[in-house]
């Protein structure tokens, strides 16, 4: 009894140390529990992958080859370590020959994706976030026509991975464990692909003329005749405007507004832990007055495909040669039966344009993938929200784990579906003169810059999981 009394006295005397030690012990126990759970999940997926590695193949068939392009700086380097723990072992167990290339820059990522072919790899797996995925898509779109397309997978190694969240929300919204990362690798193992149409974003900006310093007159060398004159250089008129067009390809969202601005700033408050996003909304709304964005928008009505906007491949006429008199008429080239024939589809509203002027604190454009088409969903909202309104809505997004758009019904006054969207920002706070394109931040100038968003006709095959195959209740 005396020991118990002395133990209680010691705790009361050193209560601060006891509280701190209790918190550290609770954190350590929880960390160990989660580590064991993630290890059990990896074991489950390893047993699934080894089934593919144990399958016998013909000696004439070479094993599958996957080229992995790694962005070492993704998520401050943690994306690479997650890939090595949760995805790379599954690829090896499945009997896939893996070639890893560390990519140093965005230009190198685009160049590699534009030249890889089937002799080097059967597919590409990109390790990184939304910006890395956008660079890889740009390279695939810019491939030469004579090069066959390669399927591409995206390992979620970024901070938000918005693109994957939009495509398969049932898998990539659950980020509290390693299942979503293992599923991205299993999609490559099982060769589970899906056709996706990338979205082309063109940002046209006015290039301001550079101010040139006045050059001092050159001294003529001694002995130069006075009557010899140098030819006058032609002067370039300052009235000629120069425009710069920047093109980005994405499968994620294109947005501007206070919510994206604050979500980008939250990483500075890492020391707040799980409260950093809530504190970022409080702090930024305490410092800034949320002025609204006003933009002129032109929409093209959505069309899933018709004889106006889609081209249908027609079989070329057979080429006759003299030997066909002996062996018979030449065969007509067959068209892929999976390709839909749009020559008989009529849509009178195809290409119809609508102009409007919209204002708000949040402008979001997301691509919605369909069977053989991609529509754009435009949302503009948060009008007259004010400081408290943005803070309240931001905290609601944090609670519901929404990082692209608002979860509050009726928040968006404009919610339309279109085939293409063209925006010109008339009024925009200087702080918000940034267009957020799935991990890439592009600066623009309000009043002169124009943004055109439109899906391309070319489709790209993506390695994507269909669902999460294991429930956490099993662990």
Image (spheres, rainbow, N blue to C red):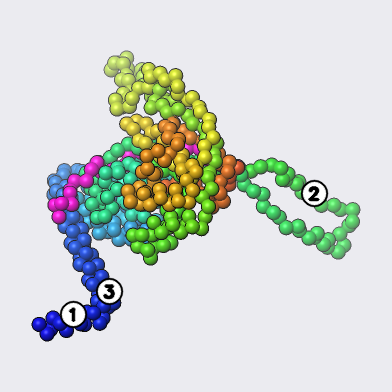
Q: Nearer the viewer, mark 3 or mark 1?
A: 1
Tell me the SS state at disc 1. Answer: helix
Q: Relative to residue 361, is residue 355 depicted above or below?
A: above
Residue positioned 17% across, 48% down in the render: 470
In depth, the one of 92 and 247 nearer the eye is: 247
Tell me the SS state at disc 3. Answer: helix
Question: Circle 2 is placed at which residue position?
Answer: 232
How busy is the neighbourhood of tag 2: few (under 14 within 10 Å), some, or many (20 plus)?
A: few
Q: Nearer the viewer, mark 1 or mark 2?
A: 1
Q: Relative to residue 318, is residue 373 depicted above or below?
A: below
Question: Circle 1 is placed at which residue position?
Answer: 8
Q: Nearer the viewer, mark 2 or mark 3?
A: 3
Residue 198 located left or right of residue 470: right
> Is disc 1 in contact with disc 2, using a CB cutoff of under 8 Å?
no
> Is disc 2 in contact with disc 3, using a CB cutoff of under 8 Å?
no
Is residue 247 visible in this depiction of the protein? Answer: no
Query: Which range is magenta?
Result: 448-475
Quadrant position of the N terminus in the picture: bottom left
How busy is the neighbourhood of tag 3: few (under 14 within 10 Å), some, or many (20 plus)?
A: few
471 within the magenta span: yes
Image quarter for residue 343? top left
Q: Which label belongs to residue 20?
A: 3
Is residue 290 visible in this depiction of the protein? Answer: yes
Residue 52 located left or right of residue 295: left
Residue 35 located left or right of residue 292: left
Residue positioned 45% across, 27% down in the render: 301
| Cα distance in 3D space between marks 3 and 1 | 16 Å
Q: Which sits earlier in the primary sequence, circle 2 or circle 3?
A: 3
| Cα distance in 3D space between marks 2 and 3 | 80 Å
């Amino acid at each position: 009894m005396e020991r118990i009394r002395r133990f209680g006295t010691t705790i009361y005397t050193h209560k601060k140390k006891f509280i701190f030690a209790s918190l550290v012990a609770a954190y350590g126990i929880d960390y160990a529990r989660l580590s064991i759970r993630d290890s059990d999940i990896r074991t489950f997926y390893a047993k699934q992958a080894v089934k593919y590695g144990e399958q016998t193949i013909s000696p004439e068939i070479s094993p599958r080859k996957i080229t992995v392009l790694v962005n070492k700086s993704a998520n401050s380097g943690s994306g690479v370590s997650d890939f090595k723990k949760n995805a790379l072992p599954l690829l090896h167990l499945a009997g896939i020959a893996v070639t890893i290339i560390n990519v140093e820059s965005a230009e190198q990522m685009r160049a590699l994706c534009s030249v890889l072919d089937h002799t080097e790899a059967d597919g590409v797996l990109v390790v990184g976030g939304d910006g890395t995925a956008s660079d890889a898509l740009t390279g695939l779109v810019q491939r030469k026509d004579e090069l066959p397309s390669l399927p591409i997978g995206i390992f979620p190694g970024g901070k938000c991975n918005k693109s994957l969240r939009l495509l398969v929300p049932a898998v990539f919204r659950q980020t509290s464990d390693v299942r979503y990362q293992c599923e991205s690798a299993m999609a490559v193992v099982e060769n589970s692909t899906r056709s996706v149409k990338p979205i082309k974003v063109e940002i046209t900006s006015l290039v301001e003329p550079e101010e040139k310093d006045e050059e001092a007159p050159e001294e003529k060398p001694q002995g130069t005749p006075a009557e010899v004159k140098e030819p006058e250089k032609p002067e370039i008129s300052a009235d000629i405007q120069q425009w710069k067009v920047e093109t980005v390809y994405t499968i994620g969202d294109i947005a501007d507004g206070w919510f994206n601005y604050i979500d980008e700033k939250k990483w500075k408050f890492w020391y707040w832990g799980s409260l950093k996003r809530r504190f970022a909304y409080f702090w930024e709304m305490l410092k800034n007055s949320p002025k609204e964005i006003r933009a002129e928008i032109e929409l093209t009505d959505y069309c899933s495909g018709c004889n106006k906007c889609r081209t249908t491949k027609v079989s070329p006429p057979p080429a006759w040669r003299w030997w066909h008199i002996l062996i018979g008429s030449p065969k007509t080239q067959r068209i892929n039966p999976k390709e839909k024939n749009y020559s008989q589809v009529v849509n009178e509203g195809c290409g119809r344009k609508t102009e409007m002027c919209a204002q708000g604190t949040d402008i979001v454009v997301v691509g919605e993938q369909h069977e053989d088409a991609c529509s754009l969903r435009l949302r503009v909202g948060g009008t007259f929200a004010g400081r408290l309104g943005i803070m309240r809505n931001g905290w609601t997004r944090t609670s519901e784990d929404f990082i692209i758009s608002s979860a509050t019904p009726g928040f968006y006054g404009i919610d339309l579906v279109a085939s293409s969207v063209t925006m010109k920002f008339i009024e925009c706070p200087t702080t918000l003169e940034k267009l957020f394109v799935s991990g890439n931040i592009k600066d623009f100038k309000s009043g002169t810059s124009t943004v055109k968003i439109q899906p391309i006709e070319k489709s790209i095959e993506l390695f994507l999981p269909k669902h999460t195959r294991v429930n956490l209740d099993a662990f």
